Image (cartoon, grey):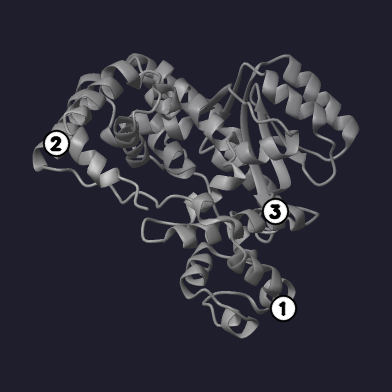
Amino acid sequence: MYQFIHQQTDLQNVLQHMDQSSIYGLDTEFIKVDTLWPKLGVFQINVNGKVYLLDGTSLDLSAFWQKLFSAEQNVFHACGEDIDLIYYYAQQKSLKNVFDTQVGMSFLGHGLQVSYQNALKMMLNVDIEKDQTRSDWLARPLSPEQLMYAANDVEYIMQLSNKVKTELSEKQLLDCVLEDCRNLTHEIGEETPLAQLYHDVGNYRNSRRQLMQLQHLAVWREQMVKALNQPRSFILKNATMLDMVEQNPRNHFQLSSVKGIRPNIVREHGKTILDLLKFLPEQEEWPLRMARPIRHSSKDITDRVEQVIADVATDIAVPKEVLMRKKWLNALYQHVVFHNDEQDLPGYLLGWRYEVLTKPLIEVLHSDESYLSKQMKVMD
């Protein structure tokens, strides 16, 4: 049913088998408890119905990564963490040949996050166990139960993929899904510039001084987690950073009283943190205040935006939650208010959604531009 590959010579046979096919069903098992980067335990691949479990702890997978990037298609279910792992290990960030069955099923009305177990039950009437999810995938030897669990995760994925693709093709939605999958894998590979990391922490309530402090802290934390390979929360949690700039501690005692800060962080890095909070550049270099959450000027505009989305969802038979996400809508607001270049919009809004949805929404929002400008106005 499956073959566990832990010898480099056996991997060559897998690579040769991959040369005879160009579409692979894939999944990963990894540990990411106390590290920033995932530690690969097992990489599962279905090649023409043959399941291989590749030992991530003993194999050099350099040639394997290249096969994935040159494949016709890589099939996953809920690919986010898998793609992140591949990008880390392969040191490449441009996997454009992905079909995600979870994304496909969202277009068919099964919700944005249908599980693999539920997907198999709904689409194929297949039941699989999910009792090894929290196993130690780095321990050796792996138990028969772990190996069977790992194998099951790709045993049926090609059948699931074929069924989902067939239903999408019947609704003329397959190309839309493939485009969304390309946008997803691009988004996973994007890194926030260091100077903008504070956007993920701060909010409109923070003063410009506090945002400058958050920028210092966020850059330092990012450098630390990458140097130490530790989760960001191990250094400073976002909530701790917010409390810190609000309390503005001046000494180690005050710093240690900030909620959520670890004693070892105060002990080892207290002076650095206090310096980051204290020594700021000239005021004109501080970030501008962040925009308040959008508030529509009238129920009329709210209704018109929602009606456009609802009409398009009905016309092309795509669920509303798939058609438009809150963060994309917010990007549209900012585009209208700040007169940004359309190419700066999220990729999702520039492809198949552009003519049917993005342009009509921009027209609606332009009619409310003066009010939106007041709401989005950056405060000094």
Q: Nearer the viewer, residue 46 or 251?
A: 251
> Mark 1 and 2 residues: CB-CB less than 8 Å, in contact?
no
Of labels 2 and 3, earlier in sequence is 3
38 vs 69: above or below = below
The residue pinned by badge 3 equals 223
Question: Can you give x and y, in whole percent of width and height, for residue 46 in the image?
Answer: 65, 29
The residue pinned by badge 2 equals 301
Q: Nearer the viewer, residue 187 or 128?
A: 187
The residue pinned by badge 1 equals 267
Left or right? Give the position of 14 relative to 182: right
Q: Nearer the viewer, residue 191 or 378?
A: 378
* Residue 161: image tag: none
Q: How far apart are the alpha carbons under marks 1 and 2?
A: 53 Å
Q: Nearer the viewer, residue 24 or 238?
A: 238
Mark 2: which amino acid? Ile
Say which element carries label 2. helix
Of labels 1 and 2, earlier in sequence is 1
> Mark 1 and 3 residues: CB-CB less than 8 Å, in contact?
no
- Which residue shows up at 80% across the image and 55% down it? 140
287 vs 187: above or below = below
Question: Can you give x and y, in whole percent of width and height, for residue 239 in the image?
Answer: 48, 66
| Quarter of the view holding residue 349 | top left
- Which residue shows up at 59% across the image and 63% down it? 233
Question: Can you give x and y, in whole percent of width and height, for residue 63 in the image?
Answer: 81, 26
Left or right? Give the position of 235 relative to 127: right
214 vs 290: above or below = below
> Mark 2 and 3 residues: CB-CB less than 8 Å, in contact?
no
Question: Can you give x and y, in whole percent of width and height, for residue 115 in the image?
Answer: 45, 44
Left or right? Give the position of 271 relative to 192: right
Left or right? Give the position of 72 relative to 243: right
Mark 3: which amino acid? Gln
